[in-house]
Image (cartoon, coloured by chain):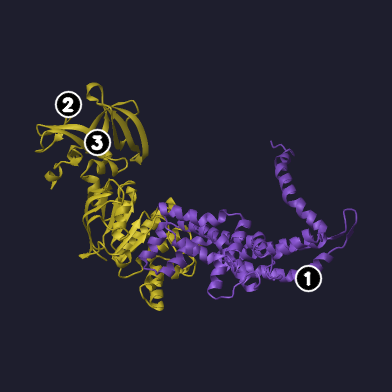
Chain colours: A purple, B yellow
Amino acid sequence: MRSWSNRAWLGVLPVVVVVAFSAVIPLMTVVNYSVQDIFDLSNRLFVGLDWYRETLRDPRFLAALGRQLLFSGLVLAIEIPLGIVIARSLPRRGAVAGIWLVIIAVPLLIPWNVVGTIWQMFARPDIGLLGAGLTALGIDFNFTADPLDAWIVLVLMDAWHWTSLVALLAYAGLAAIPQAYYQAVELDAAGRWQVFRHVELPGLKPVLLIAGLLRLMDSLMIYTEPFVLTGGGPGNSTTFLSQHLTTMAVGQFDLGPAAAFSVLYFLVILLLCWLFYTSVMREDEADGGADGR
Amino acid sequence: MAEVRLRSVRHRYPGAAIDTLRELSLDIAAGEAHALLGGSGAGKTTLVNLLSGLLVPSAGSVTFDGRDVTGLAPRDRHVAQVFQFPVLYQSMTVAEILAFPLRNRGWRRAAARARAVEIAERLRLTPLLGSRARALTLFQKQLVAIGRALVRPDIALVLLDEPLTAVEPATKWRLRLAIRSIQRELGATMVYVTHDQTEALTFADRISVMHDGVILQTDTPEALYERPDHEHVAHFIGSPGMNLLEATVAEGSFWLGADPLGSAGDLEGGPCTLGFRPEWAVLAPADGDAADATVTAIRVLGVELHRPVGIVTADLGGREVRTRQIIDVAPGDRVKLRPDTSRLVAFRNGRRLGWPEDDRA
C-alpha cells in the first residue's frame, strides 16, 4: 500500500519562497532590466542583447575587468602562501596558541570601511605613519597621485585584512593532520621541504580550496575598502568592477547597461570560481577517487 | 636486525602525576617476533614511542645490539613503524613511497627503485607500483606501509602499532599472515602492539603482557597459556580466561572448601587462588551432597564424536566457573567440579606460587 499525496510540496514551499525572494526574483529583475532601455517607469523599450554587446565593447568595462583580475591574482598569490607560512609558525597548543589566534583574528573583526579609513590615514604622505615615514626616507610616495603607490597600498591593505582568514583556515587544516604522519616522515628521515610537500600540503588541500575560493570571490567583489581608500583613483587606476557598476547604476541611473553589466559580472565570478575549483580538484579525479586517508 | 634491550626504563609524561611506565626491562632477540599485549592504558604505545625514539625515557636505557640509543633521534635509530591506520603520502605512487626512506638516506634513484621493486614483489604489490596511494584499498595501503617499513636493509627494528585496527575482519588474517611470513623470511626484529590476544598469540614468538605500566610476564604463547606468572595474565589470556577460585593450602594439599584438590607439594600453608583453564576441568552430573555447583548457562561451540561440546558455566558458592567440555548437563543441574589436579596453577597475592612448575621441571 503506497499512497500518493501532493501535500509534500507544502513542505518544501518555505524554502522555495525564501530562495525565490532572496535570489531568483532579484536576479530575474536584473535580467529583465538588462534587455530593456528604461527612461522612466512607464517608458521602456525592449532592446534585446544590445546592452550586453555595448558593455563587452566598452573599454572602461574591459579596463576595470583587467584591473579586477590583476588585483584578485595578486591578492591570492600573496595571501595563500603567506597564510600558510603564518599558520605553520604558530604554536600548536598551549595558552600562547590561543592568544596568537585572537591576535591574528583581529583584522577580520574590523568593519570594511574602517579598514579603508585606517589605511587611508596610515598611508597619507603628510601625517600617516607609512606615508610620512617613506617620505622622510626620501622616497617619493603619494598614493593619491601615483597609481603604482595606490596599488601597493591597496594590495597591502587587502593582505593585512584577509591573510588572517587563510592563516586561521590553514591552522585548522594543519591541526587536523594526524600526528602519525609527522612521526612517519621523521622515521623516513625526510627533510623539512618534504614534510611540507608530502604531508602538510596534501593535508591542507581541502581547506586551501575553501580559503582560495573565499578569497577569490571576495576579492572579485571588493568595493568598500578601495572606495574609502582611493575612491577609484588616481584617475580610474583603482576602479574595479563593483565600483564601476555603482557609478553606472546609482550615479548615472543607467539601469539597462548596469543590469547587463551586473549579469556579466556575476557570470565572470561564477566562471572564475568554477575554473579555480575544477583545476584544484582535477588531480583527485584523475586518480578515480577522493583521498582516502 | 638488532637485539633490543630495555633496562629499568621509566617514563613519566610532563605534568603527569604518575609514571606511565614503571621500572620496565625487556630483552628482544635479533630476528624475534615480539608482541606487546595489554588493554588500553597499559603503556604499550608509550613503550613503542620509546623504542622508536619519539619519546626519551625519564630513566633507564635502550640499546640496539649493545649500542646505547636512549637519546638518539628517531631518524638515527634505523627504526621503522607501521601505524594503526595506513600512513602513506597520498601524492606519491607506491613505487615512490617504497623508495622514499632510501632516497632520503642518499640512495641513488636506480638503486632505490630496484630495492622498492624487490620489496613489492615479496608483498605481491608489483602490479600496484604505478598506482597512487589514494587509489588503493585499505588492505593494500597497509601492505604498502609495511613494505615501506621493511625496505631499508639496515633496519634494526620494525614496530607495528595495532596495524590491523583499520582492516576489516575478513582480511585481518591475510595481512597478519603476510606480515608473519615476511618477518620469517627477512628475519626482521619486530615488535607488534595489540590488545587482541588472538593476534598476539598467533603472531609472536614471545609475548609481553603489559598492565598498568609494567610487564607482568614475557614468555612464549604456550607458557603464557599454561603457566601464567600472574593472576591478571591468567585471566587476560584465553577465551574465556582461567577460572580463579579462592582456596587454601594445608597439610600439603589444596582445599576448595572441604574438598581436597590434590597435592600442593611443599607449599607454605595459607589462603591462595587456584587457577585452571576451562578445558582442564569438567562439571560432572552429581546428586545430593556430592554436588557443589549449579549449571547456569550452556554455550554449544561444536560437535565432537557426535556429541555437543562447548562452554558450561556454573555457580560454585557464588563464584562463576566455566569449563570447556562435552555437554551432558543442562542449566539448573546440580554438578560437581572435577579439575585435572595435575594442572592447577596457584597464586598468592596475585603472583604464581612455586608449584607446580618446580615439580614438573
The residue under label 3 is which amino acid type? Leu
The residue under label 2 is which amino acid type? Ala
Residue A60: image location, x then y, percent: 75, 70
Residue A287 shows up from this direction: no
Q: Which residue is mark 3?
A: B244
Of badges 2 and 3, nearer the viewer stands: 3
Q: Chain of mark 3?
A: B
Residue A181: image location, x then y, percent: 41, 60
Identify whether B154 is placed above or below B195.
below
Q: Which residue is mark 2?
A: B258
Q: Residues within 10 Å of mark 2 (few under 14, many from 20)?
A: few
- Horizontal relation, residue B308 to residue A22: left or right: left
Instruction: Tell me if label 2 and label 1 are in contact, CB under 8 Å.
Output: no
Q: Quadrant of residue A153?
A: bottom right
Residue A58: mark in rendering: 1
Identify whether B306 is placed above or below A152.
above
Q: Earlier in the sequence, mark 2 or mark 3?
A: 3
- Count of number-bearing discs: 3
Residue B102: image location, x then y, percent: 37, 72
The Cα–Cα distance between marks 2 and 1, rounded to whole angstroms, is 109 Å
Q: Chain of mark 1?
A: A
Q: Secondary structure at mark 1?
A: loop
Residue that appears at 57% across and 59% down: A210
Residue B262: image location, x then y, percent: 15, 34
